[in-house]
Amino acid sequence: MGKPTDLVQGTLDLLILKTISLEPKHGWAIAKRIQQVSQEALQIQQGSLYPALHRLEQQAWIKAEWRPTETGRMAKFYSLTRSGRKQLERELANWARLSTAINIVVQEA
Amino acid sequence: MRMLEKARLRLRSLFGRPNADFELEAELRFHLDQLIEENISSGMPPEEARRAARRTIGGLAQWKEECRDMRHTNFVEDLVQDARYTIRSLAKSPGFTGVVVATLALGIGANIAIFTIVHGVLLRPLDYPKPDRLMYLTAESPAIGGARNPLSAPEYVEFRQMNRSFAAVGAYSTGGAAYTTGEVNVTAGDRPLRARSISVDAHLLKALGIQPERGRFFSEEETARWTGTLPPPVAILSHELWRTAFGGRPLVGQKVEIEGRLHEIVGIMPRGADVMDNGTQVWLPLWLHPDTARQRGAHVLYVIARLKDGVTAEVAQTELSAFLENWGERAGTTVHVPMKRPLRSVDHTLQLRALQDAIVGNASRPIWVLQAAVGFVLLIVCANLANLVMARAGSRRRELVLRAALGASRGRLLRQSVTEGAVLAGAGGLLGLWLASVGVRALIHAYPASVPRTSELTIDLPVLLVALGLSTGTALLFGFVSLGRRRTSSMATALKEGAKGASGAWRHYARRGLVIAQVAFAVMLVIGAGLLVQTVYNLTKIDAGFNRSRLVTFSMTLPMANSDPDTRAQAYQRVLDRFRSVPGVLGTVAMSGLPPNRTPDAIATPIENYTSDDGRPVAIIDYYQFVMGDYFGTMGIPIIAGRGFERTDNASQGKVAIVNETLAKRIWKGQNPIGQRLRPPGWSFGANDDVWHTVIGVAKDVRQRGVERPAGTELYVSLDQHGVSPPSMNVVMRTTVPPAALSGTIERVVSEVDAAVPVVRLRDMDSVFAESIRRPKLLAQLLGAFAGLALLLAAIGTYGVLSYMVAERRREIGIRVALGAARFQVLAQIMKQGLQVTAIGAAIGLAGAFAVNRLIASLLFGVQPTDTVTIVLVIATIMAVAVVSSWLPAWRASRVDPNIVLRDE
């Protein structure tokens, strides 16, 4: 259960990294943000979001800190590290290559 | 940088575990609350919002687990947790744990112990540089069944000069022709002691590639000059003798009395240096009596050679074959030269084999048989454990299914059960290692010389690796078996069925199959052990040709250096005379070679009116026996023709001799042996001349070279008649008192005659016999122990399976009893099941035993591998064991009370 089968393999990492690249966000906000920006096309399963966050943190691409939200509750905010920023660039480049390639194939066919 | 950060994070998640857990919990809780809030703001009532949120999220616990997995620390954590959990749960069932650990320890321990021997004796390379380059050259006389005999001195010298394959060819002797008999008297301080000796030439140490640790080795000059009457007075001591007898004080260049003569110690050997497992303590320069050195008929030298680099054993073999084609032409004689195809009894050939094979010799087969036996035992142990674990898994099904339902993955459960296996196998392995080390030490202690190379046996790295491998293998087997078929079982059914556990046909057959395998292996082992026990029994019952009851024996040596044959004979005569007046001693005699286990002499002996196969009037006689006193009367050897030696012979001029039956038959073939004449060489017993001896009697055969070997040809000469004696003699007394009561008297009598001569190997004849059959006895005892263990385990296996079956079928049995089945019918039915399984196993085991029995055929004596009595006995034993182990579960089944059973349901 909970595997992002509806997402292209590995793109969840890219989405998370991109989403927190502007400002630190907590898990809930990351999921909401992806949902909104994609106009509800991408539904992030909570079951895959948190393991992915922990994995990225373990890779030291993102770091977490506890701070209050606007409503004053404490939440765990994730932000990019320096190596995470590099990783984001790599993943973006990968994605650009991949999507272009897929587009070409799809249009040719 | 990143590496450091990663490491810090992992350490935090590992050690700051409560904190990390708490954070995870809070983070997920925050998410849940956000979801609830969103639901409320979209207009749901709070309660429903909460429920909907929980539904969306699903298993919170499972998420947490996945998050933890992402941290990669779960592996270690789980391991610790699993181990803790395992130890707790195992401690709760001490019976199960105890049985598993004990059987594992026995199975693994037996395997490690035997593998220690396999590795230390058979596999480990010899302790010389490049040991695989060393070869052993022996003389073989297939026509008379002579194998691995030494070479004659001329042959050895010729081979050393002719060959082109070997970098060095050296010789040694431990036999009488080379001055000592493999033992010497050494005077260290004021106490005479007897030490193992070897006579080696300079080439030998070059071939072996060993160097003295201090001092020097013998020069070629000292070992190749076979002239004069005595070897040069130099000696090298073993490191061990130097430490124990001389306290390790500086000794090189000093003089020590060896065989009554001062020898200069020129060197000390390194620790453990030895030749052919001889247990050498004193190394002497090889020296041969000039007569012996010339004689082609005197086979006295053992030869070890080192292949040149780049030359293979096959090349050396081919070269030797070429020599054998025309050895006579090269040597310039046709008399007694090695040849390619030895057909006649006087012919011999030469054979090369790897030195390691030569050292291990015929010990290799019994050792492999034991290894196979303990392998079987381990298989039985594993089968038993698999059964136990399956039974336990059956009763733990509900627990495991519950854990699966709570989110434990299959891999996680498997890991848990493998951990359980690892803890059990680890404990069993450690205990087994301890058992093995104790066992091997006890074995070496109890049978010091039965197995070659035991002085070097240790549990070393390869053995430890095997132990580790065995334990790991068992642990994995364990885990998989106990988890077994979890995949296909539906959680829901399992939970519903509860603790009762549904056991499919698969499991049922598997468990029966395991018991059948156990019984089969046990049958094979018990048959093997039975055959060996019979072998030992047969060996103890062999008529060695003399009456061995109440015989006490010891040996003594009057060194050649400070005594001549006449004074030696007088000294022995004095010893014998004094014993004749000791109360309780019925008769005392002395002889040169102590039956039933002595080295052959193989002396070429001229015989009157006789022509051997190769046309010469000479026969090789296997054993010369020089005797003093009423030899035949005291030993109880019947004279079957003519008469024995008598006192009146001593004064008469004509020398007389007695031959054994085999010699009479082989040489005179049906003619009357009495009155025939032969001429034993005088050097062989200290006489100056070779004189003709007239045969006055024929004695019954006496076993000389091991009780199991047929007697060879033997010639008896009376030393009383010649008034001379060889240096070493064995004294034998027939007494009415035990040897222990005599030991003080014996020491005193011998020291009165010569204070420098130690009494050695004082024992009764029964222990001489016991020693001559100690290897088959050891093998029978070990195999018997393993077979007993196998039988016990198979019995436990049968019992376990039947008990389980009865427990499973309680309901069915209850119904049948309620419907009127008689108790004995129930009992008979369960018994039948047990006996059926055993019978199938026994049949398979019997087939297996027939298939492999030729492997042990060469280890048996007086019993065929297909011996009916043994097989019948074994089958009867197995069935009896099966009856006993089936009876309890069957009886329990017959006591099932339908009221209770049916109410339970």
Image (cartoon, helix red, strand yellow):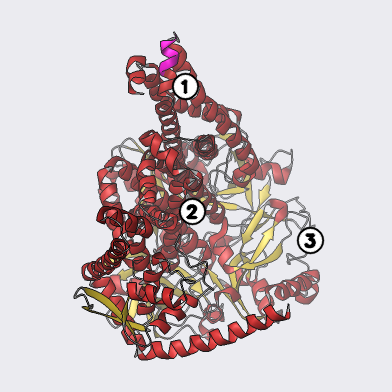
The residue to which callout 3 is attached is: B341
Front: mark 3 or 1: 1
The residue nearer to you, when weighing B260 against B530, is B530
SS for dot 2: loop
Instruction: Name the residue located 48 percent from the left edge and 47 percent from the top edge.
Output: B484
Are the residues under marks 2 and 3 on the same chain?
Answer: yes
Residue B86 numbered tag: none
Tag 3 near tag 1, CB within 8 Å: no
Task: Give the x, y percent position of residue B372.
Answer: 53, 50
SS for dot 1: helix
Chain to which the residue tagged by mark 1 belongs: B
Q: Looking at the image, tell me whether mark 2 or mark 3 is earlier in sequence order.
A: 3
Q: In the shown orientation, is residue B645 left or right of residue B762?
A: right
Question: In 3D space, how far apart are the residues under numbered discs 3 and 1 (Cα atoms)?
Answer: 66 Å
User: The residue under label 2 is which amino acid type?
Assistant: Ser
Q: Badge 1, how many Cα within 10 Å: few under 14, some, many 20+?
A: many
Q: In the shown orientation, is residue B583 left or right of residue B377?
A: left
Instruction: Name the residue located 63 percent from the left edge and 36 percent from the top edge.
Output: B847
User: The residue under label 1 is which amino acid type?
Assistant: Ile
Question: In 3D space, how far apart are the residues under numbered discs 2 and 3 (Cα atoms)?
Answer: 34 Å
Q: Looking at the image, tell me whether mark 3 or mark 1 is earlier in sequence order.
A: 3
Instruction: Name the residue located 49 percent from the left edge and 26 percent from the top edge.
Output: B834
Query: What segment carries the magenta color?
Result: B814-819
The residue to which callout 1 is attached is: B830
Q: Looking at the image, tell me whether mark 1 or mark 2 is earlier in sequence order.
A: 2
